[in-house]
Amino acid sequence: MADLLARDATGQLLALKAKEISAVELLKLVLARHERTHGRLNAVVAADLDRALDYARAADDLRAKGAAGALTGLPMTVKDTLDVIGMPASSGVEVLRRRKPDDAAVVAAVRAAGAVIWGKTNVPVRAADWQSFNRLYGATSNPWDLARTPGGSSGGAAAALAAGVTALEIGSDIGGSLRVPASFCGVFSHKPTWGLVSQAGHIPPAPGTHAERDLNVVGPMARSARDLRLLMSILAEGVPAKAEIPDLKTLKLGLWLDGFPLDSEVRATIEDLAGRLRAAGAEVRPISAPVPLDQLMDSYQVLLGSVVATDMPAAAQARLRRMRALAALARGLGAGRASWAGLARAYAASHAEWIAADEVRARLRATVEADLASLDAILVPVAPTVAFPHDHRPFAARRLKLSDGGTIPYGAMLNWIALATACHLPATTVPAGLAASGLPVGVQIIGAHGADSRTLSIAQAVDEALGGFIAPPPG
């Protein structure tokens, strides 16, 4: 029965429905896979096995009575930024691990649909890095290459999916945290339109916060596009569980590959996907950057910094405010966005500066949507490189190494994900293929505001026609 773990969530649910396996048996298979892989991956870092076994037994009873829900009996893990009853919800911080939370809104939704939630997946501290490591649980490794990160902040989730430890996950994204791990591990994710899925019970912000944070979203991760839709239909109103899958021959897609640093092996992999799409009949035409990139990144930096700064200790916030005068002087001397001066301005932005950035964001979104009037979606890289080696030095000391030996700033990880995040657009990430180095590369399918069902349908068409998930080599 071990080959059941190679199936996607939909395939496992069909096996449960056909009584090929019971929910208890499937859970035990998953736990055995976790035990075999945990020592090298460290993807799932907390568990509630007694409660999970109780839920699995209850799921078998419901199926015997013909009362199954959409996910009844399916074992699931959840990113450790989302509250789950009976498990720590640390976001990589010890003081948060001691809480006894209720279920986050999305966790309650999948539990009501019958999912058997058994574990929490690793994240960076406060979900604020593209690598998943912290002092509580250590570092998570990429199943494609243990010397490399699976990405962050939903890195434990992506590693667990790729390794067959889970078939479905809930992650979150404010700076690429759903999309980067999906690209680095060769799995699927969906960054919803902002506001479509409840953030209640997501940490950060602080526990008990009622307001929905700007930019941040909660969304599904999986090994197939059809599974993304299945989970999105449970997490959000207005996304149907089934939809018509478009014929690739009917699609008009823009391909944006210029304007930001992009490793040649990542470019080649995405161009190969574009070629396969054209061979299948899709219209894929190269486009230039859909918005002025300096305006995009300036506004995104202020919007993102304003959110992140609120979760910093009060002393750190005060220090940033004191730095503003020096930051203004440095900007006058030519210091750019990526300098300490640019960061200080973003993290200590005034309300007026936030309003100005919000206005730029709204204008850019209108510009993108004008382009999308003649396109079904835009294909966009996720990250400038493939998964990179573990590097736990301070951010300022980190550089991303390119396949030609050159390097680019670590902050370049924000570039390609900025458009969808800043403009509140949906972005479905699908595997584009393997790079020359043998590592996965993902691509974003970005659509118009609210067009989540459309980008999910395009992703499924690509997945089913051209193939998507490739399992990493056995460890």
Image: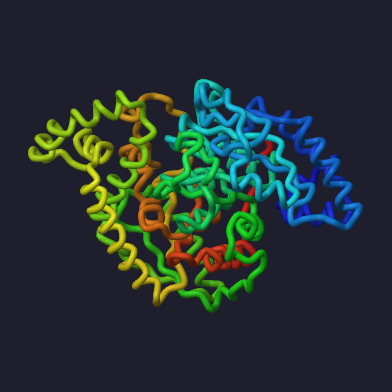
Task: Please state which of residues 98 and 259 is positioned toward the viewer in this rendering.
Answer: 98
Residue 53 in picture, x, y percent from top left: 81, 35
Give the residue drawn at x 64%, y 70%.
Answer: 243
Query: Can you see residue 439?
Result: no
Residue 344 in picture, x, y percent from top left: 23, 35
Task: Please state if 428 lies on the left or on the right of 420 as rendered.
Answer: right
The quadrant where residue 161 appears = top right
Taking 212 as reference, is 205 above or below it? above
Residue ranking furthest to the right: 64
Residue 282 in picture, x, y percent from top left: 51, 74
Q: How many marks can you see?
A: 0
Query: Can you see residue 2?
Result: yes
Task: Please state which of residues 39 and 210 is positioned toward the viewer in this rendering.
Answer: 210
Residue 193 in picture, x, y percent from top left: 47, 58
- Quadrant where the C terminus sits is top right
Give the residue drawn at x 26%, y 58%.
Answer: 359
Task: Please state if 251 lies on the left or on the right of 169 as rendered.
Answer: left
- Quadrant where the N terminus sits is top right
The quadrant where residue 24 appears = top right
Taking 46 as reference, is 228 above or below it? below
Taking 335 as reference, is 462 above or below it? below
Give the residue drawn at x 39%, y 33%.
Answer: 311
Task: Please state which of residues 200 and 272 is positioned toward the viewer in this rendering.
Answer: 200
Give the residue drawn at x 29%, y 29%.
Answer: 317
Task: Please state which of residues 366 and 144 is positioned toward the viewer in this rendering.
Answer: 366
What colour scheme was applied to this rendering of the protein? rainbow
